[in-house]
Amino acid sequence: MTTVERVRECLQKIKKENGKINALLEIRPESELLKEAEEIDKKIKRGEAGRLAGKVIVVKANINIHGMNVSCASKVLEDYRAPYDATVVKKIRQEDGLIIGIANMDEFAAGFSGETSAFGPVRNPVNNTLITGGSSSGSAAAVAAGFCDMALGSDTGGSIRNPASICGVVGLKPSYGSVSRYGLIDLSMSLDQIGSLASNVGDVALLLSVIHGRDDKDATSIDCGKLDLKKLNKASGIRVGVLNLEGLGVDEMVKELINKKVEEVSSKNGWKTKDVNIENIDLAVETYYPLVYVEFFSATRRFDGRRYGKKIEDVAGPEVLRRILGGGEITKAEHEGRYYNSAIRVKEFIRAEFSKNFKSVDCIVSPVLPRLPWKIGEKISVEDGYAMDVLTIPSNLAGNCSISVPVGKIDGIPVGIQITCDKFNEEKLLQIAKAFE
């Protein structure tokens, strides 16, 4: 299939299905897309095309793409047109990836279900009555619906892996610092990471190989070497750590499916398994939110109605306001350092626990989510909603790389396994993920 043919196929699916799914907020003009696709096909014929030639890509609505409406799915930025490309977008274009449109998301990435977008919830392509998970809801749904080959998302506490699991696609959160965040409208600067989603591990790896690496425009990014995609099928002698899930509220059916898959894959490949206990992991959620509340409060002070559109407190939805108000309270003078610094200390405890365990295992596996998704509009308490990320938040706190890979279904609903490796071990992570796939 040529790039032109693939673009036409994607556009046809988008026209037919996006009205029901609401995965994409903006699609580039068809004439513009076809012209770019023709140029890519010419490069392919000349043997001059980049690594992403022929691939159609969607980008989450909090990553800047020049000239497009990067709204963060909020009325605050509904008129904002990005004046520049994020570094990851530049890298995609340099390798001839074709960006087709902007994906819906939870408003300002503040959400766990895909329901908080100011432009309506994203519906799950597997079952339109169900949530997609969040906050990279549109990115996961677009891949699952066949609107694109790959997508960019951002992951602060599970925002790529959560919807990837629920929509039955592959979603990768790289190690903190391995991908430039320049051009990302941040939720929490110390936790955010841009990552990739696709229908298979190979495409997730390919997109990561293009976007990762040091960037002078992001001081937190580092040079972490090149990924050798030819080694994806070479996972041997792996020591698998199975996370102790006691006290984390994981559904028994989910546990059973994950344990069965771990046993099956380990036995087939001759891998060894052992139980792993991460002390203080039960504190991950209550450690994460003070950090996010404070950093989000700080990041949103620029949305004061003077430069970017409307004042955030005037038009944002309840989850965004909850985080802003919470961050404002925590940062008041009488509480200075009391909660945020305590959270930093527990974050360090959890990071040290992971590092200790990675001396005896190559990866740590668990479910991505503790339970199956609910129906859109169903009443869920804030505490129950936040608990959806109880298993994904720890790797953000530790800065590790993690991936969600589909391993089966329960009652027709996809379930993903989470595989986590130590920082900057993405190549090993992808090898293990490929074996599970």
Image (cartoon, rainbow, N blue to C red):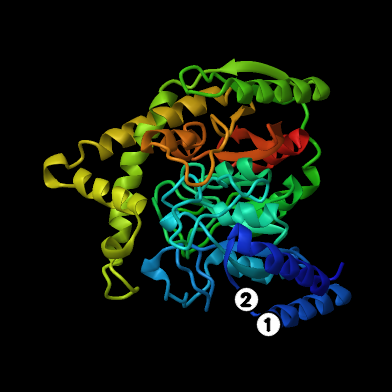
Q: Residue at x 77, y 26 (%)?
A: 265
Q: Residue furthest left?
A: 334
* Location of mark 2 (residue): 28
Q: Nearer the viewer, residue 197 or 121?
A: 121
Comparing 166 with 337, the one in front is: 166
Residue 302 place in picture, x, y as percent: 29, 66
Residue drawn 43% across the image and 61% down it: 118
Instruction: Determine whether 366 is above or below 306 in the image.
Output: above
The quadrant the N terminus occupies is bottom right
Looking at the image, which residue is at 29% across and 53% down? 297
| Residue 305 falls left or right of residue 276 | left
Disc tally is 2
Residue 224, compared with residue 7, is above or below; it is above
Crowd rating for badge 2 (residues with CA inside 10 Å; few <14, some 14–19, many 20+) = few
| Residue 83 in picture, x, y percent from top left | 47, 78
Q: Residue at x 78, y 43 (%)?
A: 231
Instruction: Tell me: 255 left or right of 55.
Output: left
Q: CA distance from mark 1 to mark 2?
A: 7 Å
- Whether residue 97 appears in this view of the structure is no
User: Do the CB atoms of the residues marked 1 and 2 lie less than 8 Å apart?
Assistant: yes
Q: Which three-letter amino acid code belongs to the residue tagged 2?
A: Arg
Residue 32: mark: 1
Q: Is residue 309 visible?
A: yes
Q: Secondary structure at mark 2?
A: loop
Q: Residues within 10 Å of mark 1 (few under 14, many from 20)?
A: few
Q: Say what secondary structure mark 1 lies in.
A: helix
**Residue sitting nearer the eye, 51 or 419:** 419
Residue 53, image x, y percentages: 77, 67
For the C terminus, the quadrant is top right
What amino acid is labelled 1 in the image? Glu
The location of residue 346, given as percent across then percent down, is 35, 30
